[in-house]
């Protein structure tokens, strides 16, 4: 993702937009993170995005479906939207945000913790993160994306947080440094044991067909088949 919000100082934002417009980007792999709709920078961002073949836009501090609709209307093109749940208001508006037009999925924003308490243990955010996962599933959206890990030189924290996010039901994680890419991929990758298990389930289904079956001392049914297929697909994608 290319960030036009937090990563760019106010006096450098126009130069950042000009650089994006002039760059030879592979737009199939580019997400642009815009400035919030209530800022003076929003309309300038929209003017840029209307001039380039952007396919996905990250919307920070998404606090209502009206806010998402405003972004959609301003783009004047079919473009997937990735709202970030970064504030308390965002969290309470999660259901409406997920149902808004063009929303592909949502991403969790760690800034929500700083807006609730000055200092917070990350475990206190488990409820908020679980709600994001559950609401996404209820809205039939892809698994949400977890927030960034601030520490970028020591990869142990991002590795641990990636594994934790995977176990909570997130489908990916935002990163802020190239050194974080491999630890995050490994964190979300299925374990060797999971891959072996998924392969055995596939063999059982291929041999005996779908449905509730007893094999190797455990039951195999439709939900188990789906989980096994997802594991195999994720293993192939990450490898």
Image: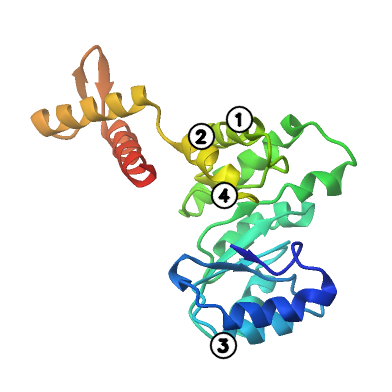
SS state under label 1 = helix
Residue neighbourhood size for the residue with mark 2, other residues' Cα within 10 Å, grouped as few (<14), some (14–19), many (≥20): many
SS state under label 3 = loop
Q: CA–CA distance between discs 3 and 1?
A: 40 Å
Q: CA–CA distance between discs 3 and 4?
A: 27 Å
Q: CA–CA distance between discs 3 and 2?
A: 37 Å
Residue at which label 2 appears? 187
Residue at which label 4 appears? 145
Residues 149 and 19: in front is 19
Q: CA–CA distance between discs 1 and 4?
A: 15 Å
Identify whether 89 is placed above or below 70. above
Residue at image coords 45%, 71%: 26
Select label 2 or label 4 by which is in front: 2
Residue at which label 1 appears? 160
Identify whether 86 is placed above or below 25. above
Residue neighbourhood size for the residue with mark 1, other residues' Cα within 10 Å, grouped as few (<14), some (14–19), many (≥20): few
Left or right side of 136 for 83 = right
Residue at which label 3 appears? 51
SS state under label 4 = strand
Task: Say whether marks 1 and 4 touch (CB < 8 Å).
Answer: no
């Amino acid at each position: 993702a290319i960030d036009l919000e937090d990563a760019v100082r106010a006096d450098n934002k126009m130069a950042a937009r000009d650089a994006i417009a002039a760059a030879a980007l592979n737009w199939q792999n580019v997400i642009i993170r815009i400035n919030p709709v209530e800022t003076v920078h929003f309309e300038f961002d929209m003017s840029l995005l209307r001039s380039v073949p952007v396919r996905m836009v990250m919307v920070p501090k998404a606090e209502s479906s009206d806010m998402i609709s405003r972004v959609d209307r301003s783009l004047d093109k079919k473009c997937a939207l990735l709202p970030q749940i970064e504030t308390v208001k965002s969290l309470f508006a999660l259901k409406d945000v997920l149902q808004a037009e063009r929303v592909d999925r949502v991403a969790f924003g760690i800034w929500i913790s700083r807006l609730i308490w000055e200092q917070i243990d990350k475990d206190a955010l488990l409820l908020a993160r679980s709600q994001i996962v559950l609401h996404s599933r209820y809205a039939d959206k892809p698994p949400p994306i977890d927030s960034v890990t601030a520490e970028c030189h020591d990869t142990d924290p991002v590795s641990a947080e990636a594994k934790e996010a995977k176990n909570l039901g997130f489908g990916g994680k935002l990163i802020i440094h190239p050194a974080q890419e491999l630890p995050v991929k490994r964190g979300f990758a299925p374990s060797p044991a999971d891959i072996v298990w998924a392969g055995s389930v596939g063999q059982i289904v291929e041999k005996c067909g779908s449905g509730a079956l007893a094999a190797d001392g455990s039951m195999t049914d439709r939900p188990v088949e789906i989980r096994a297929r997802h594991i195999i697909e994720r293993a192939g994608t990450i490898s």
